[in-house]
Image: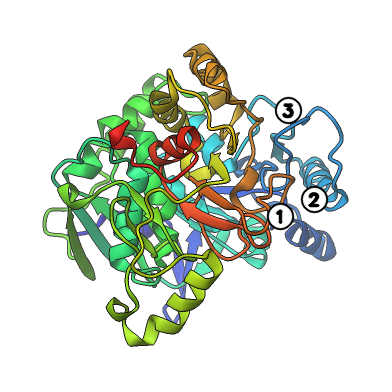
Amino acid sequence: MKTLFEKIWGKHVVDTLPDGTVQLYIDRLYCHEVTSPQAFAGLRQRGLKPFRPKHVICMPDHNIPTLGQDKPIEDPVSRNQVDTLARNAADFGLEHYGLMHPKNGIIHVVCPENGLTQPGMTIVCGDSHTSTHGAMGAIAFGIGTSEVEMTLATQCLLQQTPKTMRITINGRRKQGVTAKDMALYIIRRMTAGGATGYFVEYAGEAIRSANMDERLTICNLSIEMGARGGMIAPDEVTFEYLKDREFSPKGVDWDRATAYWRTLCSDDDAVFDREVSFRAEDIEPMITYGTNPGMSIGIGETIPTLESIDESGRASFRKALDYMGFEAGAPILGKPVDYVFLGSCTNGRIEDFRAFASVVKGRKKAGDVTVWLVPGSWQVMRQIRTEGIDKILTEAGFELRQPGCSACLAMNDDKVPAGKYVVSTSNRNFEGRQGPGARTLLAGPLVAAAAAVTGRVSDPRTM
């Protein structure tokens, strides 16, 4: 009578304190350059070493440039953060995938595709989108810098046990609807804070029929509705994805692992603290119009009117529309676009580039649009070249950049200028998220591709 979450969480509880706080064992700690320097400094100050160094992976991704990675980083702040991570990893004997390493890229893309992330694990990183890894049937969540230090020192964390929620999407998606559209639809219906305090399990036919890259996208965006994390029970899709990956179990160990992984599902009589259901056929290609991921509409819909917004939310609604330069009740189709960004830990995987290429094939990039196409890892880049996707993109007038977080968060050179509109496949559309004054419209790779060849918000189903 246990949920998937309860099965994994229970196996990792080391101790429970009188107030209910749990000491939770952590299988993997992923470290990037932004949230780890103070943690390593804390170890030095206390004369400590990582308790289980082989369970820690270090990788720069937020600050790295997506052009000229073989040259020194020009920005002094970014260079210092990237160099500091390399030095800390060397000093403490930790695995480090630095710039130009064949395994470098976005940490939430690289670790699943190399088999480091596996079902049944507990995984943490100083980054909110650690929830991505839950797609493999793991408990994965973001932590703060002090907790990074705690995990380095003890391989454990003190945690309050979250509540459980199951979100079921019944039925099958309509043509032209991507996993990103499903996630944005869920966030719109749940609101940006509707899952606060919960760990979410996704279920239903629309989830089971999704491939692994799509599942990673859905779990990635769990945090955008306030959830502690998201997860999907492992199945044949998971096993096929993991088989023969570099760090996946081999031989007898593989047989033993998959036998255990098959037990990782919620029991038929498991009770969740909350159950929510949606219908896949209700979901259209989605796009945001405001300044949080919950402010989205179907691409053929109009922006909500002020009267349709709850009175308590009208002030923030007006503020968002003022920032975006949009009018309540107006259509979003046809809005001019200045930039398009394909990438991030949300949509920087091979399936996203396949989808983008399926729309732009035989067409040309709009002349007045700047397009940044950024693979989530060097492995994705290699797949793009192997499959000939790079040739499709080149013929259409596009250019690939090198892997990294890129324009997702404006901590590197890829910043959208103030006042410009960007259709972005990343995860957040907060004010200034992609550059001071930048105006972000979150969407999936098909909507991004349509904008890239038309120069405006367009419905990819018409293409």
Under circle 1, the secondary element is loop
Identify the mark at residue 34; answer none if there is no mark: 1
Q: How far apart are marks 2 and 1 (CA)?
A: 7 Å
Asked if residue 231 shows in the view, the reply is no
Give the amino acid type for the residue marked by disc 1 in the picture: Val
Residue 355: x and y, percent? 39, 29
Q: Quadrant of residue 172?
A: top left
Q: Which comes sooner in the sequence, label 2 or label 1?
A: 1
Depth check: 208 or 149 in front? 208
Q: How far apart are marks 3 and 1 (CA)?
A: 19 Å
User: Which residue is found at the position 77% from the left and 57% from the top?
Assistant: 37
Labels 2 & 1 near each other (Cβ < 8 A): yes
Q: Name the residue under label 2.
A: 81
Q: How far apart are marks 2 and 3 (CA)?
A: 16 Å
Give the amino acid type for the residue marked by disc 2 in the picture: Gln
Q: Residues within 10 Å of mark 3 (few under 14, many from 20)?
A: some
User: Which residue is found at the position 24% from the left and 43% from the top?
Assistant: 207
Q: How many labels does the image show?
A: 3
